[in-house]
Amino acid sequence: MKIVSQIKLPIENEMELFEKKFSGAMSSKVALLNRITHYVVNRKGKQMRPMFVFLIAKMTGNGTVEERTYRGASVIELIHTATLVHDDVVDDSNRRRGFFSINALWKNKIAVLVGDYLLSKGLLLSIDHEDFDLLKIISVAVREMSEGELLQIEKARRLDITEAVYFDIIRQKTATLIAACCAMGAQSVNAPKEEVEAMREFGELIGIAFQIKDDLFDYGEEKIGKPTGIDIKEQKMTLPLIYTLNTVPPKDKRWLINSVKNHNKDKKRVKQVISFVKDTGGLDYAVSKMKDYQQRALAILQNYPNSPYKASLELMVNYVIERKK
């Protein structure tokens, strides 16, 4: 059994019902919109975000979920989808999960409007049911994600960013949404405030580990073949590279910065950068940091009695750092 199916096992019924409710939450009187949202729904990924919402809700809510849990998961997916649609416009990207992006098929103007529509649907779903506590969780996440993206753009011009700034960026850009899913799950079953906060922290820790794992893919793994070097070509500052820049002598640092800035399209030079980062311990350092975040997330789960939901969440934490893509 694939690991994702195994994780989903204790919430299979909830996920099936969620998919129906989510499709309904997107519907509109405009035929063009329905055509586009139908395209979006049929190209969903692994659905990790709603899975977090339901697993946490069941673990903190004694095995039950509320109607609010479905709305919370739908709000997260609507608003997350809106940010992805807008991201593809910002990045001028023609692909999303192997399919054409909305802006590639329907152009930027329609893509921006569809993103706005999904955002408003998410907000209204909460407001119509007076789920203001759930709305606050996702609104804070959207603010942080926007700040994280802008912080990255601001800092990307300078290649000597510190590790602290890197962690600020990934906490806001990537981890904040997973943190919101976990807080949303607990809040939707009216868990105590301290528990909602603990679940938010749990999600943040996993989100950071997830992003470090993504950074490591750029340096290749035996299982996925050759190093990709895509982040280096795009001048993205990843943890292995930041560690190396901050630990090598000035001469090597200048060579690295010059390589990433001015020779990032030169395949041979990119390979040299990848080898240099590996040889100076950049990869080992990033792996140890990732495992540290993983262990801290698992430690939070130890406060809960054994249940199928806790077991699935433990599997999820391990899957995040062991996945092959």
Image (cartoon, rainbow, N blue to C red):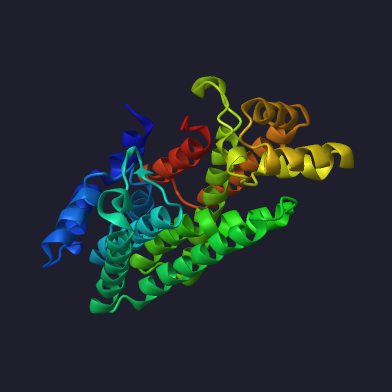
Which residue is drawn at the image coordinates 56% and 63% (left, top)? 150
Image quadrant in which the N terminus is located: top left
Give the number of callouts.
0
Between residue 250 and residue 204, name the one nearer to us: 250
Q: Picture quarter containing residue 316?
A: top left
Which residue is drawn at the image coordinates 72% and 37% (left, top)? 259
Res 195 visible: yes
Which residue is drawn at the image coordinates 20% and 63% (left, top)? 25
On the image, the x and y values in percent for residue 290 come to 62, 41
Q: Is residue 197 above or below residue 317?
A: below
Image check: 138 left or right of 8?
Answer: right
Image check: 50 left or right of 320?
Answer: left
On the image, the x and y values in percent for residue 70 come to 26, 60
Between residue 258 and residue 55, name the one nearer to us: 258
Res 14 visible: no
Image check: 185 left or right of 216?
Answer: left
Which residue is drawn at the image coordinates 53% and 44% (left, top)? 210
Image check: 2 left or right of 22?
Answer: right
Q: Is residue 257 above or below residue 22?
A: above
On the image, the x and y values in percent for residue 252 come to 84, 36
Q: Is residue 295 above or below residue 20?
A: above
On the image, the x and y values in percent for residue 243 come to 75, 42
